[in-house]
Amino acid sequence: MAEITRLPGPVADLWDWQLDGACRGVSPEVFFHPEGERGPRRRNRDAQAKAVCAACPVLTQCRSHALEVREPYGVWGGLTEAEREVLYDGIQQAS
């Protein structure tokens, strides 16, 4: 679960970037894996999600959001769950 204490408040200006996301017209199933998905199937789905993210005008805001609130699931800002975990580990080790 995302750490809700890290979520920005209910001010629309803090969330408006989501309205411009390239993902808005894409099925959430592209970004969130079904339970137990592994191997080539998961890599292919992740690659499909990352392709959407690569052309997204709000990729930076999305990635920042995911890292700030530690989104636990899905592809956010072009990063998979595992890629975000590596970044979190690097941040922890640097502290």
Image (cartoon, rainbow, N blue to C red):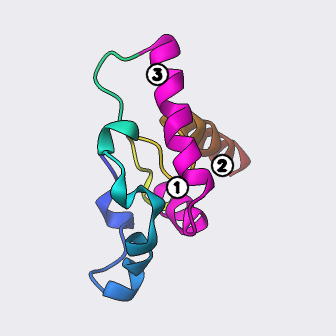
Provide residue 71's location: percent of width, then percent of height: 41, 49
Provide residue 86's location: percent of width, then percent of height: 62, 36
Q: Label 2: few (<14), some or many (≥20) within 10 Å?
A: few
Q: Label 1: few (<14), some or many (≥20) within 10 Å?
A: many
Residue depth check, mark 1 versus mark 3: number of the one nearer the observer: 3
Point out the stretch of residues depicted in magenta: 38-66
- As drawn, the label of residue 83 is none
Classify mark 2: helix, strand or loop: helix
User: For the point 52% across and 55% down, which residue is it?
Assistant: 67
Classify mark 1: helix, strand or loop: helix
Based on the picture, tell me whether residue 70 belongs to the magenta stretch: no
User: For the point 51% across and 32% down, which residue is it?
Assistant: 46
Based on the picture, tell me whether residue 43 belongs to the magenta stretch: yes
Residue depth check, mark 3 versus mark 2: number of the one nearer the observer: 3
- CA gap, disc 3 to disc 2? 26 Å
Q: Is residue 79 something one can see in this rendering?
A: no
Q: Earlier in the sequence, mark 1 or mark 3?
A: 3
User: For the point 32% across and 85% down, which residue is it?
Assistant: 12
Q: Is residue 50 left or right of residue 11?
A: right
Q: Which residue type does callout 2 highlight?
A: Ile
- CA gap, disc 1 to disc 3? 21 Å
The residue pinned by badge 3 equals 42
Among all residues in the image, which is located at the extreme right? 94
Above or below: residue 2 compared with residue 56: above
- As drawn, the label of residue 67 is 1
Main secondary structure of the magenta stretch: helix
Q: Earlier in the sequence, mark 1 or mark 2?
A: 1
The residue pinned by badge 2 equals 91
Q: Which residue type does callout 1 highlight?
A: Leu
